Amino acid sequence: MPAPVIEIKEVTLAFNSGAPPELAGVNLQINEGEIVSLVGPSGCGKSTLLRLICGVLPPTKGWIKVYGKKAVPGSGLGFVPQDALLFPWRTVLANVRLPLEIKAVGKKKMAELNEKAREALRLVNLAGVEEKYPHQLSGGMKQRAALARGLVTGSRILLLDEPFASLDDLTRTQMQLELLNIHARMGSTVLLVTHNIFEAVFLSGRVVVMGEKPGRILGEVKVDLAYPRHLRIMGTPEFSRKVGEVQALLEKAWGD
């Protein structure tokens, strides 16, 4: 049985004492090699939960462990935000290399760091644009670069905060397939925040549905559709049934 790599136990987060909590009593376990999606209404704390897992926010109550240890910044997680957040004055290669520069603290030669950055770019099919600048890239290419930056340190856990939300439908579909390909090749564990139910079901082995006020987990849908997945699966009755199950849980969240 796959081992848990992320464990969240009775986590509550309140930004101000006496104010309603942002999150309350959240319990969740992510096993090694899974793709799990978080869906729920805007403002229910999905992105906040990712920040807690990264260790940049401490929970008010409860605990979070990554690989059995308390979640702290630099716990070996790769994070990809909704906006690529590439530095405009750095080349694509330099942007992807940045986490290695921070981590290396001068201990490794630049040539070695560059080769690792090139490997990450090849992994997301972005070889050949190393010396370009962000303004020379399409939206999809920027997100590929952001994904490469999340992978470059060798992180086996990827936290993705709506990374495809700003893309057109065709590019978004291409990025979904790219993510599945990376998952198949690397065996990464992926926790994805998305508002797109179809995306969640297509990519995930489990879809976790959150409610709001306070943010909490209402339930989850196990997506027992075999990998590798292809676009044609979206036309099957099984896929539609899973989308319906997620939708039913979301209606409960809206009803709250």
Image: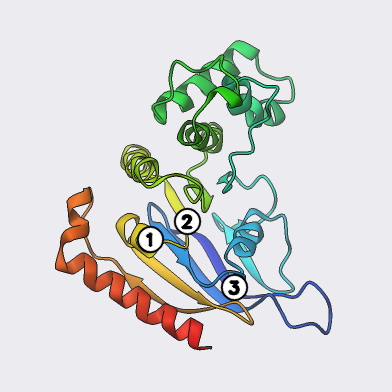
Residue 51 falls in image quadrant: bottom right
Q: Quadrant of the N terminus?
A: bottom left
The amino acid type of the residue labelled 2 equals: Leu
> In front: 92, or 159?
92
Helix, strand, or loop for circle 3? loop
Q: Answer whether labels 2 and 1 touch (C-beta < 8 Å).
A: yes
Position in image of residue 88 (x %, y %): 68, 26
- Amino acid type of the residue that numbered disc 3 sits on in the rendered structure: Cys
Figure check: 51 above or below 106 = below
Q: Which residue is drawn at the image coordinates 52% and 31% (left, top)?
A: 145
Q: CA–CA distance between discs 3 and 1?
A: 17 Å
Residue ranking furthest to the bottom = 256
> Residue visible at 52% across and 40% down?
155
| Distance (Cα) linking label 3 and label 2 | 15 Å
User: For the residue marked with disc 1, what is the amino acid?
Assistant: Ala
The residue at which mark 3 appears reads as 44
Q: Which residue is mark 2?
A: 192
- How far from the left and from the top, in percent, is residue 162? 51, 53
Residues at badges 3 and 1 in contact (C-beta under 8 Å)? no
Circle 1 sits in a helix, a strand or a loop, which is it?
helix
Disc 1 marks which residue? 200
Q: Nearer the viewer, residue 158 or 69?
A: 158
Seen at 23% across and 73% down, the residue is: 241
Q: Is residue 28 left or right of residue 172?
A: right
